[in-house]
Image: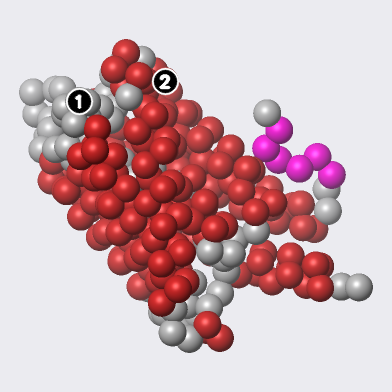
């Protein structure tokens, strides 16, 4: 799988850095909660839902501050899809973003496996037989996350200090709601990494996390675009990339 461009041009160099940022950011937001889950096995570990929610939200918050200026901090294939569906991110770059995100998640889960052993941080529905409840939960919490993301990340009037806080807190809310039911994934990459190393029920139930979060994110993006009041203030994610593509397409 080729993720990074082979021809060195100014645009390709910038895209390489964006793909690297997506890889690193996704690595961190997957490594943190999965490592916490693994360390919770020790006598002094903390296996609580609140801890899982906080570390998930705080790691996302930190990575948005750290890497958002480079790649717009998607770190989630469902979010990238939402931005693309809403035409806030070029479709031609979605696959490389997805590849970088999934690779970051797999490497993060592999690192945790090397350090602590396999089986930590997997997402498995508490009752796989409750099909509608499981799908509905992941769709709705992913809808909530994407709604907040597109609202704070694609309006030029929003202060740069706001997105990380708003998105990080929304991740906490999503994990607290979905944790007891589905694990509160909201992110296909986050669920795939640990599932690949754990196998078993984590892998057989992965379809839920591959399908439901993108559905919720796509619906949220379209809903927000439909109710957006001031389209003149709307921007892409990252906006520089979208503007460059639009400029190329508008040339005779």
* Tag 2 secondary structure: helix
Q: Residue 65, located in which quarter of the rendered image?
A: bottom left
Q: Which residue is mark 1?
A: 129
Quarter of the rendering occupied by the N terminus: top right
* Tag 1 secondary structure: loop
Q: Is residue 16 left or right of residue 117?
A: right
Residue 4: say if magenta.
yes
Q: Is residue 232 left or right of residue 227?
A: right
Q: Which residues are the magenta region?
A: 2-7
Residue 13 image position (x, y, % from top left):
74, 52
What kind of secondary structure does the magenta stretch mostly adopt? loop
Residue 54 image position (x, y, % from top left):
21, 49
- Contact check, label 1 and label 2, Cβ < 8 Å: no
**Colour mode of the rendering:** secondary structure
Residue 244: say if magenta.
no
Mark 2 burial class by Cα count in 10 Å: few <14, some 14-19, many 20+? some
Q: Which mark is residue 224?
A: none
- Disc nearer the start of the sequence (1/2): 1
Mark 1 burial class by Cα count in 10 Å: few <14, some 14-19, many 20+? few
Q: Residue 203, located in which quarter of the rendered image?
A: top left
**Camera-nearest label, 1 or 2:** 1
Q: Residue 170, located in which quarter of the rendered image?
A: bottom left
Quarter of the rendering occupied by the C terminus: bottom right
Q: Nearer the viewer, residue 99 or 59?
A: 99
Q: Which residue is mark 2?
A: 196
Residue that sits furthest to the right in the current view: 252
| Vertical side of 38 occupied by 23: above or below | below
Q: Is residue 223 left or right of residue 40?
A: right
């Amino acid at each position: 799988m080729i993720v990074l461009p082979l021809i060195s041009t100014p645009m390709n160099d910038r895209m390489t850095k964006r793909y690297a940022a997506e890889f690193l950011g996704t690595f961190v937001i997957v490594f943190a909660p999965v490592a916490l889950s693994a360390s919770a096995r020790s006598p002094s570990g903390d296996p609580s839902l609140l801890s899982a929610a906080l570390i998930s939200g705080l790691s996302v918050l930190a990575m948005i501050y750290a890497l958002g200026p480079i790649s717009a901090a998607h770190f989630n294939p469902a979010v990238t899809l939402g931005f693309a569906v809403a035409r806030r991110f070029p479709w031609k770059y979605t696959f490389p973003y997805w590849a970088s995100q999934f690779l970051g998640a797999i490497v993060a889960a592999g690192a945790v496996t090397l350090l602590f052993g396999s089986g930590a941080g997997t997402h498995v529905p508490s009752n796989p037989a409750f099909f509608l409840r499981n799908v509905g939960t992941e769709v709705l919490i992913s809808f909530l996350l994407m709604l907040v993301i597109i609202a704070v990340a694609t309006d030029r009037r929003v202060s740069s200090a706001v997105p990380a806080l708003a998105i990080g807190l929304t991740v906490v809310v999503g994990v607290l709601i979905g944790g007891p039911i589905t694990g509160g994934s909201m992110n296909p990459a986050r669920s795939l990494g640990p599932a690949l190393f754990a196998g078993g029920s984590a892998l057989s139930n992965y379809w839920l996390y591959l399908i439901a979060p993108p559905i919720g994110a796509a619906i949220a993006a379209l809903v927000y675009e439909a109710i957006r009041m001031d389209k003149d203030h709307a921007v892409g994610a990252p906006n520089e990339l979208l503007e460059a593509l639009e400029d190329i397409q508008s040339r005779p």
